[in-house]
């Protein structure tokens, strides 16, 4: 059975159809890329999955369970975590606190037991710290633990966003242009990192990316969006040679067409 | 520095503080004692407002409303039936309230609880709006409370207010509650819940995407903040011995907002320091309201001049020290000993 399934999902903003009849079938453990030119509706798809935008039509299923219209934090708790295209870290909190905040949704202790430091809360706090530190170590951020997230260099901020998303223990990880603003070397390192996360955590990943080389090298399947319409689906090689995709990205050869 | 050492330091300084309170309660003159009481109440109000405005980033202007509820609810419970009968000479007070008299402590708790319920009632619907809109909505709420108190003659005695309240508030009560407020809110903001609150302040969209239930956490901040505001209001009522709806107007809220801004949004230490400072400055600056002669010009005493000076301080702070006195920083034992150590190194 597929882990994340989008059935004929459509989003309209007034007269504009940002995404139309979008279908996705994400299997457990897969790494799928979602590409398309600027304004194609890629991020909108993410916003629909996390219910940042309401779905106009269609259904979203996580592991067979309908999550359409569920509140964003409930969806995260159900197992979908995301990063943001324009980094949205908690800038005035430390790196460790950023990751700990993402662990908060699994906290069972009440406010009162947190305030008075009852044993149940304390042991949970220790657990959360352990988990957060382990995650930071995996991503090589452990030495910045006490720094403010906002003071980190750009590349590390991107990494921290991934760490924070992973801390929610997602079943599906949505990465929104993780390589944006990175140079080729950094992009290469990022590709290795994504592959490692996938292997270490057996993480199912849906990736939005502009950087073609990154998508082509690491994704198993690719979906291409243009103006909200799915114009191609398939293996990287198929996509590379698909005339529709080339047209969407580069335009037609004929200037007067 | 290890935990045990810090705990010992905290306990020792607490004991010294209690001893000082005892000395103050017994040997200091009534005027200073009153300022110290007001200072404690400002601390309670400042710290509780800081939880909502500073840590959760929800700009609320409703604190005077919560205080009014706490002050009235507790006063109506700890006043003796005969005192109530004396106060309500235009229209008698309604039945159950006319007979009830409970101890001060429990009356305060009920006052806090009433304010907390109001905090929930206000917080829940209006947390859908953010920023300036929330400020307007909460300000509107405080005004509604004031109008209701003015018109509910048979419960609140309307604009006449409640007079001759017994003075239960002393330094133990006021500072006891102030310490508890500081303890509670400090522990809260340092906990996992506190991190969630701060994440809402930093980026609401990201916080929600990381699984923070916005509604639950924002309402929680409002309820806890309102509870302590209610307690502060109750203490203030018993200290001033008289309350009327118009003493809980916007300028009271403004005073507390000022304490929080000057001390630093997101710094409990800042709210404590500024709460005490403002209480003393209010009295020290009284001279500017008396008639005076400057360069041969005689200026008649203008009441309210003090607020002008505070406004000036606030403007300067906002322009030049945007993060207030302390920013997000807090007092810690490490901080004291680290600076000590550095000084020792330099002198060596």
Image: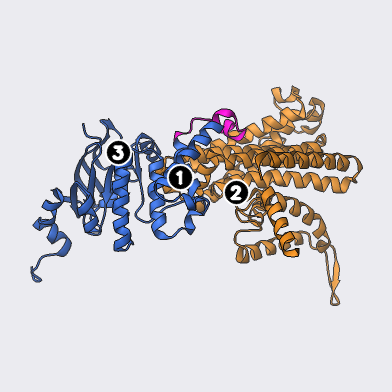
Chain colours: A blue, B orange
* Residue beneath disc 2: B61
Does the segment drawn in magenta span residue B22? Answer: no
Q: Is residue A198 left or right of B212 when viewed as pictured? A: left
Mark 1: secondary structure: helix
Out of B147 and A141, give the one closest to the viewer. Answer: A141
Identity of the residue furthest to the front in this view: B348
Q: How many C-alpha atoms fall within 10 Å of the one at disc 1: few (<14), some, or many (≥20)?
A: many
Point 86% across, 72% down: residue: B293
Mark 2: secondary structure: loop
Marks 3 and 1, the one that precedes in the sequence: 1
- What percent of the width, then of the height, locates residue B16? 81, 41
Point 79% across, 44% down: residue: B37
Q: The magenta stretch spans which residues?
A: A106-121
Name the front one of labels 2 and 1: 1
Vertical position of residue A113 compared to residue A55: above or below: above
Out of A87 and B11, give the one closest to the viewer. Answer: B11
Numbered circle sitting on residue A202: 3
* Residue beneath disc 1: A99
**In whole angstroms, how far apart are the C-alphas of marks 2 and 1?**
32 Å
Q: Chain of mark 2?
A: B
Quarter of the view holding residue B185: top right
Vertical position of residue A211 compared to residue B45: above or below: below
Point 10% across, 56% down: residue: A241
Q: Is residue A211 left or right of B261 when viewed as pictured? A: left
Q: How many C-alpha atoms fall within 10 Å of the one at disc 2: few (<14), some, or many (≥20)?
A: many
């Amino acid at each position: 059975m597929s882990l994340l399934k989008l059935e004929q999902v459509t989003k309209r903003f007034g007269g504009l159809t940002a995404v139309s009849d979008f279908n996705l079938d994400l299997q457990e453990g897969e790494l799928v890329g979602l590409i398309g030119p600027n304004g194609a509706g890629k991020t909108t798809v993410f916003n629909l999955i996390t219910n940042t935008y309401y779905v106009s039509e269609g259904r979203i299923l996580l592991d067979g369970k309908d999550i359409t219209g569920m509140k964003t934090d409930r969806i995260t708790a159900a197992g979908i975590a995301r990063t943001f295209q324009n980094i949205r870290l908690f800038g005035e909190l430390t790196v460790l606190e950023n990751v700990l905040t993402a662990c908060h949704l699994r906290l069972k202790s009440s406010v009162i037991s947190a305030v008075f430091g009852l044993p149940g809360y304390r042991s949970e706090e220790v657990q959360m710290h352990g988990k957060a530190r382990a995650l930071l170590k995996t991503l090589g951020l452990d030495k910045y633990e006490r720094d403010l997230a906002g003071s980190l260099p750009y590349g590390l901020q991107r990494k921290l966003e991934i760490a924070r998303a992973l801390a929610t223990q997602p079943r599906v990880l949505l990465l929104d242009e993780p390589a944006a603003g990175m140079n080729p070397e950094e992009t290469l390192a990022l590709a290795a990192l994504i592959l490692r996360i996938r292997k270490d955590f057996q993480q199912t990943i849906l990736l939005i990316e502009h950087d073609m080389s990154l998508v082509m090298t690491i994704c198993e399947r690719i979906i291409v969006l243009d103006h909200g319409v799915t114009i191609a689906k398939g293996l990287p090689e198929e996509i590379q040679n698909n005339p529709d995709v080339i047209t969407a990205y580069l335009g037609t050869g004929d200037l007067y067409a | 520095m290890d935990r045990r050492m810090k705990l010992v330091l905290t306990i020792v300084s607490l004991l010294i503080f209690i001893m000082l309170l005892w000395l103050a309660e017994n040997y200091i003159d009534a005027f200073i004692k009153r300022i110290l009481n007001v200072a404690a109440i400002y601390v309670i109000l400042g710290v509780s407002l800081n939880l909502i405005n500073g840590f959760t980033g929800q700009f609320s202007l409703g604190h005077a409303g919560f205080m009014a509820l706490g002050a009235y609810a507790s006063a109506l419970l700890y006043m003796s039936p005969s005192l109530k009968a004396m106060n309500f000479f235009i229209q008698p007070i309604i039945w159950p309230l006319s007979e009830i008299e409970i101890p001060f402590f429990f009356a305060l708790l009920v006052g806090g609880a009433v304010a907390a319920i109001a905090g929930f009632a206000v917080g829940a619907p209006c947390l859908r709006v953010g920023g300036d809109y929330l400020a307007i909505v909460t300000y509107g709420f405080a005004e509604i409370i004031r109008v209701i108190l003015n018109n509910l003659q048979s419960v609140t005695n309307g604009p006449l207010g409640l007079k001759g309240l017994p003075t239960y508030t002393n330094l133990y009560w006021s500072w006891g509650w102030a310490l508890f407020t500081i303890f509670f809110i400090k522990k809260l903001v340092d906990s996992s819940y506190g991190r969630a609150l701060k994440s809402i302040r930093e980026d609401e969209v990201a916080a929600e995407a990381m699984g923070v239930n916005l509604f639950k956490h924002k309402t929680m901040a409002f309820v806890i903040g309102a509870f302590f505001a209610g307690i502060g209001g109750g203490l203030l009522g018993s200290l001033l011995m008289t309350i009327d709806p118009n003493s809980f107007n916007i300028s009271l809220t403004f005073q507390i907002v000022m304490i929080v801004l000057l001390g630093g949004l997101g710094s409990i230490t800042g709210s404590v320091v500024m709460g005490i400072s403002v209480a003393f400055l209010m009295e020290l600056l009284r001279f500017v309201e008396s008639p005076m002669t400057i360069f041969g010009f005689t200026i008649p005493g203008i009441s309210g001049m003090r607020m002008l000076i505070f406004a000036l301080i606030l403007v300067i702070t906002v322009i030049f020290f945007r993060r207030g006195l302390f920013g997000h920083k807090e007092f810690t034992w490490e901080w004291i000993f680290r600076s000590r150590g550095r000084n020792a190194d330099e002198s060596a």
